[in-house]
Image: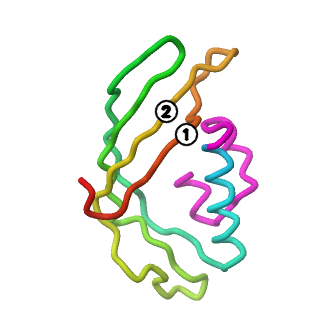
């Protein structure tokens, strides 16, 4: 998502390689909204995910992602975000696919300051 967000490329062929189902739909809708609003994302998020549980083909992951240097800008170059980025709680579920690959199938990102 971070790579596609640089240009708000909601049609990126890379997205389905890493996300599926609910997660993919959430990501593409978010990128489409940015595209339609002429917004791009600059910088990079910092993540340090940890596995909290694993059961069969499903793994639960938590993170305290840092979006301090990953912000939305209008294509004119003006900062769009009213609130600066920061540390936020992230949970995700990753599922092994029939081909052996792993894809994020659901995730939740909380507000800045939640971790």
Left or right: residue 13 compared with residue 81? right
Q: At which x and y percent is residue 33?
A: 67, 70
Label 2: few (<14), some (14–19) or many (≥20) C-alpha neighbours in 10 Å: some
Secondary structure at numbered mark 1: strand
Q: At which x and y percent is residue 112?
A: 32, 64
Determine contact: label 2, label 1, CB under 8 Å.
Answer: yes
Q: At which x and y percent is residue 12?
A: 72, 51
Label 1: few (<14), some (14–19) or many (≥20) C-alpha neighbours in 10 Å: some
Secondary structure at numbered mark 2: strand
Q: In the image, what residue occupies the spot 65% across and 45% down?
A: 24
Tell me the CA gap for discs 2 and 1. Answer: 5 Å
- Identify the disc placed on residue 12: none
Q: Is residue 20 magenta?
A: yes
Q: Eyeballing the image, is 18 above or below 27?
A: above
Q: In the image, what residue occupies the spot 56% across and 35% down?
A: 104
Q: In the image, what residue occupies the spot 60% across and 76% down?
A: 39
Q: Eyeballing the image, is 25 above or below 33?
A: above
Q: In the image, what residue occupies the spot 76% across and 55% down?
A: 11
Which image quarter: residue 88? bottom left
Which image quarter: residue 95? top right
Q: Which residues are magenta?
A: 1-22
Q: Eyeballing the image, is 23 above or below 86?
A: above
Tally the marks.
2
Left or right: residue 14 compared with residue 6? right
Q: Which residue is mark 1?
A: 106
Coloring scheme of the render? rainbow
Earlier residue among tags 2 and 1: 2
Q: Which residue is mark 2?
A: 93
């Amino acid at each position: 998502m971070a790579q596609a967000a640089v240009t708000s490329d909601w049609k990126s062929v890379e997205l389905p390689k890493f996300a599926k189902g609910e997660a993919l739909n959430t990501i593409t809708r978010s990128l489409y909204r940015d595209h339609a609003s002429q917004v791009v994302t600059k910088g990079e998020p910092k993540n340090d995910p940890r596995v909290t549980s694993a059961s069969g083909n499903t793994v639960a992951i938590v993170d305290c992602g840092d979006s301090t240097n990953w912000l939305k800008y209008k294509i004119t170059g003006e900062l769009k975000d009213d609130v600066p980025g920061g540390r936020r709680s992230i949970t995700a579920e990753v599922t092994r696919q029939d081909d052996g690959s792993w894809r994020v199938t659901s995730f939740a990102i909380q507000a800045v300051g939640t971790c």
